[in-house]
Each structure stands twice: as C-alpha cells, then as structure tokens.
Amino acid sequence: MDNFIVSARKYRPVTFDSVVGQQHITGTLKNAIHNNQLAQAFLFCGPRGVGKTTCARILAKTINCEHISEHAEACGTCESCKSFQQGNSFSIHELDAASNNSVDDIRSLIEQVRIPPQAGKYKIYIIDEVHMLSLAAFNAFLKTLEEPPSYAIFILATTEKHKILPTILSRCQIFDFNRIRVEDMANHLASIAQKEQITFEPDGLHIIAQKADGGLRDALSMFDQIVSFSNRNITYQTVIDNLNILDYDYYFQLMDSVSAEDAAQALLIFDKVLNNGFDGGHFISGLATHIRNLLVSKEPATLKLLEVSENIKRKYMDQSQALSSGLLLSALNIANQCEINYKSSKNQRLQVELALLKMCHIASAISLGKQGSFTPAAATTEVKKKLPDTSINHPTAVANSAPVPKHVSSVKEPAPIQALNNNPAPVVENTAVTTEKTAVKKGWGKISTSVNVPNLNTIFEDKAEADTDEPDLVQGNEFREVTFNAFISQWNAFADGLKQTSRITLYTIMTANPPRLNGVMIEVDVENAVQMDELKLGKIDILNYLRVKLQNFSLDLTGIQVEVTKVRKPYTSAEKYQAMVSKNPALETLRKAFNLGLS
C-alpha cells in the first residue's frame, strides 16, 4: 500500500499563481523579482494556515531559479529548482526558531551567512516562528539582519507579530497575510475533490470552509477526515455529523416557530438540539448569527456579507421576506442578552428557554404596541406626549382636576388651562404614525418605526398603568410673561402641598433658600449632591405644576450647588474657652488678673 500524503502537503502551492487568497502579496513579490528590487529581509505575518511558509518557499525557489519566466515564476526544471524540491539545496536553508532560539543558534547562523552560495545567486534563510527567539538572540541577530552580505536574503515568518522587537521590524519588509475567504477556500476544496475524483455537495464544502475560520490548512485537514468518514462522498449531512455542527435547518425551523408564535415547538426544537449533544451556549450563539444573517438578507446591498453557499443563501432570502425587521431586531437583542447572561447563570437551560419564549411573543407584543399607539424609544419630535394628572403632584389641585387624555399630539395641543376645567381635550391622531402603519416596507424599512419592542420587560404592561409611571414633561404653545410675585406664590403653594404629602426633603430644598427667576429659568440653590439628586427627581412634578398655573410652557428648572463652610464646634476645654474669648475678650483680662487656669 502506498504511503498516504495529506492534502495539505500533496496540494501545497509551488507557484505564486497557485497560492489561494493572497493575491495582494504574491503580486507584490512577483513585481519585486521582475524589477530586481529585492529587500535583504522579509517578514511574513498572519494567522496559521494562510500560506506564510509556502510563500516563503516559493519566493526562495523563484529567486534562485536559473530560468525565471516572464510572469516571475520559477521554471521548476533547472538544477536549483530540482534540488530545492528534493530538499537538498545548499543555497536555501530553513530554520525552526521554536527549537533553535538561543544565542548560540543565531551565532551559528551568522557564521554560515559569511560563506557565499555554492550554487545560485543568493543564499536564502527561511526562519519560521521567528517570535520564539529569545531577547538575546534577537539582539545578536540585529547587525547581520541590517547589513547582510549582498548574496544573503532572510525570510522570517510568524503568527505573533507583536512579540517581535521593533528594531527587527524596522529592518524588514512586512507582509500581512489575510484570512482566506470562505468562497475562495470552498472553490479550492472543490478543485481538489475533482482531481481526487471525490463526489461532493457545494453546501458541505462551504461548511468545511466556514469551520476552518480562514485557515486553508485546517480546511484541508477536515477535508481529509470527512473523505474517510463519508467513503469519498462528501455531503452536507456527513459534514455536520462529523464536525459536530448545528444544522441550518434547526434555526430555520425555530424562526418559523417564532413567527407563528408556537412556543411549544420552539422548546421542542431546543430540547432536540440538547439531546444531540450540543451545548446551549453554542446554540444561542448560532441563533444570534442566524438572525443577523436574516437581517443582512433583507437588503440586496448587504447580501454579499453572507458567507454561505447559494442554496443556503436562497433559504435566508425567503425566510427574511416573511419576517419583519422589528421582530428580527428584537429577537437579536434577546439572543444577545441571553448569550451575555448564559455563563453566569446557574440554570443555563432556563436562560435559553426564557429567551425563546420571549421571542415567540414578540409578534403579539408588536401588535399590542400598535393598538395602543406605542412609540419606540428612538422616536423623533412627533412622539405623542402625555399630560399628567396634576392631582397626583399637588393635593390642592384636586378640585380643579379632571381626567385628561393620556396622549396629546405635539402638532395640535389644546391649552393646558382647558385640560384642567372638566373639558377633556380631544385626542389628535399623529399623522406621522398613521403613515408609517400604512406604508409598504421594503428591505430593512425604517428601523426607528419597525423596532416596536425595544424592551420586552415593559411592553406587556397594561396600558392603564401608564398613569402610574413617571410623567412626561407638559408641553404647550402658550408663553405668557411670568412676574416674580406670581411665580413665588405658586412656588410656595406647591411646596406646601409637598409638606402635606410628606415629601419633606424636596419641601426643605424649595423653602431653605429663595429661588431666583432669570427669564424662564428657575435657579435653586442646593447644598450637596443628595439634594441635587432629589431636586432632579422632583423637577418634572414642579415644572408640570408651574407651567400650567403660570401658563408658560418654556419654564425650566436647574439646581446650583453652593459651597457651605463647615464650622467646627469646640470640643476640648481650651477650644470652648477660645470660643468664649472670641465673643467676649474681657474674659481673658479676668483670667490674667486672677491667674486662673482651665480645668
């Protein structure tokens, strides 16, 4: 039986053109060879399995090739190329810095550099994993790296560029290798499968490419493993079975259940996932990615961000059209919060199940929000305002109070005085909100209007409970001139009402120092941060009362913290005596006259 050679070695690129996904680097190196502008030192850095060492070997072979082609590629037939391919070249040396990282190893290398090449124009040294060199070895290497002989070229390769000394970096031409794109990797695997006469499904190769995370060597290792597992027939099912990957179908079925508000089916799908041996944290992370892909699929301009096969891409497009952007964004927010809390939770399964239940109720929550004229937090100036009942804020206003509409349009709002005289103001429907309900949504739609459920913890509250929430600031269009006497009269009246309702702290702040009225700005002095916080909490109640009573809706309130000089009380006998002397200096004369002391 012939010895098996893994695909990563068997199909290792031997020319620049055969390197996958690094055209920006191979093109630069080919131009440098063609123009004879080779640096004395190169540094190839990037993630594992992206072609750093491969490009270093191709560059070394091409530099010493005796018959370089017009496209700056090695011929592969000359003596230099053959000796390199057979591994017995005297001009190209490979050194593993992980096992040769001492000063003595570098000194030995420097001694070899002094000897001219026996064959070829250049003597090339490829040092892999160069970041493993010790600090002393780096320093010993500096001088030779900066001023090597004319025939010496160094090619360094590393996965951890940040561990290399800046003095080394400044002496090299640095080439940063990218992670290989999923599409490029899948096409390369397909070409290998055709050469090996292996049957395959494109979806299966795409899954391998995604799992490799940008590293072609990892992809080829998984490819060999699945070829053996599937008996040379790579299908989508064999790939997900062998690599222990959650199937796309789980997520598609789950989002269908979310759309249909079928919580029972969603929980059963999650239970099936757990029974197949998958972790709940991995499941919720994959669900968040799936929802993100659905959002990406809604707009043709962002469709290119999907790194999946064409068949899966069509499934994403079909499901994204059936789900609204508001539902998807709310579900993505729930999945993200679940993923954050998953590791710290003692009952991790419950965390995921709770998230799934919330997702299944998003559609009804959006419907409830529309019926109650629910507006998103990101609404603009046309958000409807709520006029609070002044009887809650001030007990003396009970006689004049009456039910007021919960929402008043900012476009056409009746005078607040009318709202307090047993004449409920009519509710004016916001034309902007009506237009948004009837408009045909395309692509993502307007995010500000489609995200109707920013927080599911509050959306299911009864609409009648809105009156018990913190009131909004009263808005209006009347701006009557306010005299100080009228202002201070209403100020004191509101303060008296606070005293009757036992809001003593705010009452003390309002009465301790007289307020100042600068135009429409009310300034109140506070002594510390605690009083400032209390004033901020009561600001809306104060302004709602004053704006209505004074019929000026531009009034505003601010607190000004003043410095209070602390007077230290006398404690010892000497301190008490000095305090008394400061008030009556004759005491000191009396003490001296009778030669008295302090007890």
Image (spheres, grey):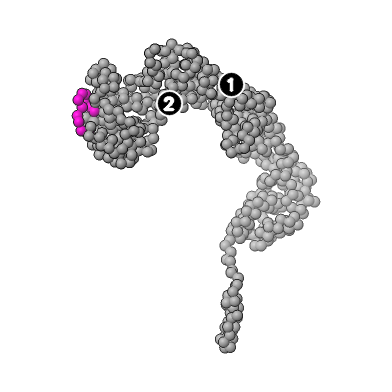
* Number of other residues with Cα within 10 Å of mark 2, as a class: few under 14, some 14 to 19, many 20 or more: many
Does the segment drawn in magenta span residue 231? no
Q: Position of residue 104 (x, y in %)?
A: 27, 37
What residue would you read off at disc 1?
249
Q: Position of residue 183 (x, y in %)?
A: 45, 21
Foreground of the two, 76 or 24 = 76
Please, is residue 548 above or below residue 128 in the view? below
How far across and how far down the image is residue 396, in percent? Answer: 77, 54
Q: Residues within 10 Å of mark 1 (few under 14, many from 20)?
A: few
117 inside magenta stretch = yes
User: Against 595, is 570 above or below?
Assistant: above
- Residue 325 picture quarter: top right
Quadrant where the N terminus sits is top left
Where does residue 427 sit, x and y in percent of width and height? 73, 38
Q: Measuring 54% from the left and 20% from the top, which residue is drawn there?
A: 241
Task: Say which residue appears at 42% left-offset and 13% top-offset.
Answer: 196
Is 581 on the left or on the right of 361, as rendered?
A: left
Q: CA distance from mark 2 to mark 1?
A: 26 Å
Mark 2 lies on residue = 215
Q: Can see residue 486?
A: no
Range of residues picked out in magenta: 113-123
Q: Amino acid at mark 1?
A: Asp
Q: Which mark is residue 414?
A: none
Amino acid type at image mark 2: Gly
The part of the image, by quadrant, that contains residue 452 is top right
Compared across the picture, whether 529 is left or right of 76 comes to: right
